[in-house]
Amino acid sequence: MPIRTAYQAKIDYVQIMDEHGVVDEKLVKDTLSDEQVLELYQYMCRCRALDETAFKLQRSGRMGTYPQNKGQEAAAIGAGFAAKRGVDWLCPCYRENAALWMHGLPMHYVLLHWMGDERGNQIPEGVRMTPLCIPIGTQMLHATGIAWAMKLKKEPSVAITFFGDGATSEGDFHEAMNFASTFQTPTVFFCQNNHWAISVPRESQMNSETVAQKALAYGMPTTQVDGNDLMAVYKVTRDAIERARAGGGPSFIEAVTYRLADHTTADDARRYRDPKEVEAWQGKDPIIRLRKYLTVKGLWDDQKQAELDEAAKAMVTEVVRAAEGIAKPTVHDIFDYTYAQLPSELDVQKRTMRTNSLGQAPEQAGLASGA
């Protein structure tokens, strides 16, 4: 019998705006209006300002370890803008601050999280997202479960989950992808391929030419996109969300971007990254290319940038003040937010602030001598 092809596929790479701010005039018509681009550019700048201040907070001992989002704003904002606030669910990693704020999370909550205050993880009522996820890859399972629930309840909601290229080497990734594909859940898997899993380059942790092709094994529509191109990210994410909302099942998006800063403030990327590589990607900064585009269109200039910088500075001051000025939690908070009715043994601990039996019932002290 002749040999025949059992399977064949291709993966599209989508770019609408290059690093010089030049756009494909045909493709750009199907994306964002100039007014929307202008709004999102200003939003990106404000988010960058807060991100850089968070770095200084850590360096000055006012906050714990912090992972900067610098360089990846277009991926988070483009995808976040494509999702419907209050309708769709966001299941983030920890470099999607901009999308979380866009969907209703108070900006100072992220600072609280990294300050070690659990109230930063208390998602406000009506805000559809899960807390920042530090374990690598577990949020993909959460997103698939939420999407399955939405499907069973017949709600027109989509769950979009964000993760890095390193997370696709985790077992949780494959379990989530397989379940989502098998049960056709309305899930969008959004991979921010920033080329580094802490200090491990993408090429050292996977042998596939792209991250996107991993979705082919699960029969899932998959696309690779310029993750620093706001318009392209918005378009591919919008299309994936619309397909999922219409019953078309899950999709996978590989947003090719770059982590311009260290992995976290506990890392020193100079020890493992080539400075020439970093310099090359600095020229592809999503904020810089968007500014070039707006300037050529006559929608932006140095004066407007200066005004925006001042406004962002004032906004950041207020956000930091809200985080650092929050009232200290009471010890009783440890007990009050788990059970509807506190079990008797925990009620004793709450009243006595002791966990051992002697501390809770001092009269037992005489039992040993009477034995």
Image: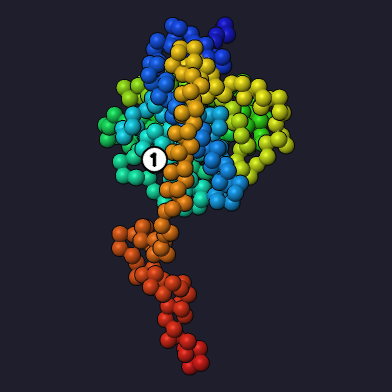
Total count of labels: 1
Residue 110 against residue 342 in the figure, above or below: above
Give the image location of residue 254, x and y in percent. Answer: 52, 24
**Circle 1 sits on which residue?**
105
Left or right: residue 213 compared with residue 176 = right
Looking at the image, residue 3 sits to the left or right of residue 122; the answer is right
Residue 160 position in % (x across, y down):
41, 31
Whether 323 is drawn above or below 175: the answer is below
Residue 331: % across, % down: 42, 64
- Which residue is found at the position 30% from the left and 63% from the top? 341
Residue 14 visible here: no
Residue at 44% in and 33% down: 311
Crowd around label 1: few <14 · some 14–19 · many ≥20 (10 Å): many
Q: Depth check: give the residue in front, 169 or 301.
A: 301
Q: Position of residue 281 (x, y in %)?
A: 62, 23
Please name the residue shown 47% across and 16% down the image: 294
Image height check: is 223 above or below 140?
above
Q: Indicate the secondary structure of the residue bearing disc 1.
A: loop
Q: Looking at the rendering, which quadrant does residue 102 occupy?
A: top left
Extreme bottom residue here? Answer: 370
Amino acid type for the residue under numbered disc 1: Leu
Q: Residue at x 42, y 20 (%)?
A: 37
| Viewer-proximal residue among 173 and 21 | 21
